[in-house]
Image (tube, helix red, strand yellow):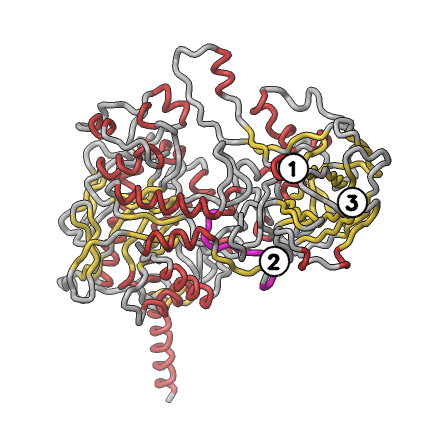
Amino acid sequence: MKRFLIGAAVVAICLLGLRYAVYYGGFYLDLHPEASIEVNVRTDGKNILVRNEKGEFEKFIVRGVDLPSSIAGHFATDYAVDEDTWLRWFGMIQDMGANTVRAYTIYDDSFYNAFYEFNKNNNTPLYLLQGLQVSDYANSSGNDAYGAEFYAALKEDSIDIIDVLHGRKNIFLNRMKGSGIYRKDVSDWVLGYVVGNEWEPGTIAYTDNNAKRPSSYSGTYFQTVDDSTVFEAMLAKIMDEMVIYESSKYKVQKLMSFQNDPENDPFVYEPLYARQLGKFSHVNAEHLIPTEQLKSGYFAAYRLFEFCPDFSEYLVQDQDPGFKAMLDGLDKETYCQGYTQLLSEYHTMPVVITSYGFSSSRGTDTEKGPLTEKEQGRRLAEVYNEIVESGCSGALIASWQDEWGRRTWNTSYAVDIQNTDLWHDIQTDGQGYGLLSFEPGETESICCVDGDIAEWTEEDRVLEQDGISLSAKYDERCLYLLIGQEGLSRDSELYIPLDITTKSGSMKSDSHGLKFERGADFLLCIHGEDKSRLLVQARYESLRENYQLQITGEDPFVYFPDTDADSFLPIRMILQNHKLVAEDVSDDELLASKRYDTFETGRLVYGNGNPSDSTYNSLADFCYGENIVEVRLPWALLNFSNPSVMAVHDDYYENYGVEWFRIKEIWLGAGTAGQKEPIAMEALRLKGWGDKPVFHERLKQSYDIVKESWEK
C-alpha cells in the first residue's frame, strides 16, 4: 500500500509537472514532423486569400477596426472589459460591415472566450489580426532592440500568443498584458500576426548602428537580403521562430507581418528635410524575404497618419528603380497625398493599413480644427475607399471605442496623467477616435445642450437676481449652465464670471466694463451664435506659461501677469508644426518657421447637442431656447486637472508649471452688458465621483455613416 501511495504521488507530481510545462512553459513534442501544414489564409501576389466554406480560396479585403482593451473608468492595461461586453461589441462591429478586428497585444481570456462564442456557429465570422507590442519603456529606453525588456519580452509574447490562440495556455501576473486560463481555440479565425505597434525611431537607429549585433538572418521561413539592417534581422528572427513554433506544434500557418509607419518607412528624404522631419530610421518589408517553406504568406502593415504634407516633394527621386515614375503617378488629391498608393506600388506583397482614424473630440492639435461625428464618419468612409482604390488590401479604423485614458501631447501638461481614465476630457484629441462613445450617466446624460429645460429642476438653481436666473450641474465630462432671462434673444449679451481658484482672479474686466463680487478666473460671454466664447484671466492662462516660448519666442517668466490682472484673454490650444524650410531662407524666416500656431478652443460652437435629435451637432457648446440658453463647459477648459476629485491648477508662476490642488466649490454669477453694480456671485458646491465614474454606451453618428458605406 505504501509503495502504491508513493507511486501514485510520483505519477501525480509528474502529471502536474507535465501540465505546468505544457500550459505555462509551452513544452511540446512534435510526434508527426512530416505532417502537412494546414493553411486557411494565404497571399497571392498583392492579394490576401481566405478559404471559404467550399474549401476554395477567395480574395479578402480587410474591413475592420482596432479594438483596444479599454473601457471608461479604466486604462487599457487594466483589461476591465468583460466577456459579455466583448460579445456585444463583436455583434455591433459585424453589423457595421466589418470582417476583421485587431488586438494590440495579449488580452485577458475574456476576449478570446467571447471571440470563440461569437464565431463558433457564425457562417460569416469575424477574423482577428493579433498584435504584439513591447512596453513604452522598452521602446523608448536607452537600450537597443536586443535589450532584455525589448527582444526577450517580444520573443516570450510571440510564443505565448500562439498558445493563447490555440487554447493551450495559462498566464498569471502578466505585467501590462492580459492574463487568464486560455482554453478556447480561436485559431481558425486568425488572419495573422502583426509584430509591434509603434516603433520608436531612435531605438531603431541605435539598434542599426550597433556593430555587435547581426545585420542578417537566414532561417527556415524568413531570411534577409544583403543590405538589410540589424533591426530588420531581429524582426526576421522573431517572425521565423513564430512560424517554426506554430508549424511544428499545431501544424498550421498564419500570415505574418510587422508594424510600420511613415516615420520608419523605407522611403528616403532629401537630407535637409529628413533632419527637419526627424526621419533617420528605415525599416523595409522588402528586406525580409519569405522562403518557399512559408505556405501562408507575408504582408506589409502600416499605421497611417499625416506625417509630412506634400511629402513626395521632399523624397529622393531615384532611390529605387522606377521610384520616380511612382511619384509622378501619385493621386495627390487623396488623404496623405497618395501615400497609400505609393506603398501599394512600392511593395511586392499585400499592404494593409492597420490603423487610421479621425477624432470627434472638441479639442484638436491641427489647424483644420475639430470634426463633428458626421464629419468623422464621412472622412473614415472616404479614406477607406481611397485606401482600397489605391491598391491596398484593406484597412482598420482606429478605433472601435473612445478611450478616456488616452493622452495627447498638447493637453498632457494640463491634466493629472495618472487619472485620465476617470473622466472624459473632450479637450484631448486622443480620446475621441472611437465609433462608440462612453457617455456620462447610467442610462442617459444629465444634460443635453438643446435649449430644452426639461432636465433642469429647482435644486439646480444657483442664483436668481435682477431678472436673471442661473442653474448649474455637472458630470464626468462637463459643467452645465442654464441661464434664464425674460426676453432673452440672440442679440442679448450675458456675462457669467467663474471663480475657480483663490490663488488669482480679477474683480473687474475693464474691456467689458464689468465688476465682480469675487475675483473671477473665467468670463463666459454669451452673445449670439457667432460671438460667444469663454475667456480666461491673464494670470490663469495655462498656455502662456507652458508654451509661450514655442509660440512667440518670449520667456513667460521674464514678465508675467499679476494675480489680479484685469485682462481676460481668449483660450487657445497649441497646434502641430509641420513647416519645412529650404536652404536659402533668411534667419528671420527660419525663426518664424519654428513658431507654433494656436487654435481658439474657448470659442463656443452653437447647435443642438442632443444625440437623439435629427439636427444633432456633437460639437455644440450652447443652444438657445425660449428665454433661456444652455451651455456646456468642458472641465479642462476651466483648468481642472482631475475633476474626479475636483483638482484644479495652482498658480503657474509660483510653481513653475502645472501643479494642482483640490477645491470644494466654484463661484458663479450672471450679469448683462452695461451693468453698473458688481455682478453678484454664489457658490456651487462640488463633490467628485472618485474612481467610480458612471457611464453608458452610445454609437456615434460616424458608426452609421461607416456602416452605410461598407454595406454598399
Q: Secondary structure at mark 2?
A: loop
The type of residue carrying mark 1 is Ser
* Farthest residue, direction bottom: 1
Helix, strand or loop at mark 1: loop
First-in-chain label (2 vs 1): 2
As drawn, is 691 to the left or to the right of 561?
A: left
Q: Amino acid at mark 3?
A: Trp
Q: Of helix, strand and loop, which one carries label 3?
A: strand
The location of residue 18, given as percent across then percent down, is: 33, 69
Q: Residue at x 32, y 33 (%)?
A: 333
- The mark nearer the N terminus, 3 or 2, is 2
Q: Name the foreground residue: 210 vs 335.
A: 335
Residue 210 seen in this snapshot: no
**Residue bearing mark 1:** 532
Which residue type does callout 2 highlight? Answer: Ser
Q: Residues within 10 Å of mark 2 (few under 14, many from 20)?
A: some
Q: Position of residue 107 (x, y in %)?
A: 42, 58
Percent x, y of residue 534: 67, 37
Q: Quadrant of the N terminus?
A: bottom left
Label annotation for residue 445: 2
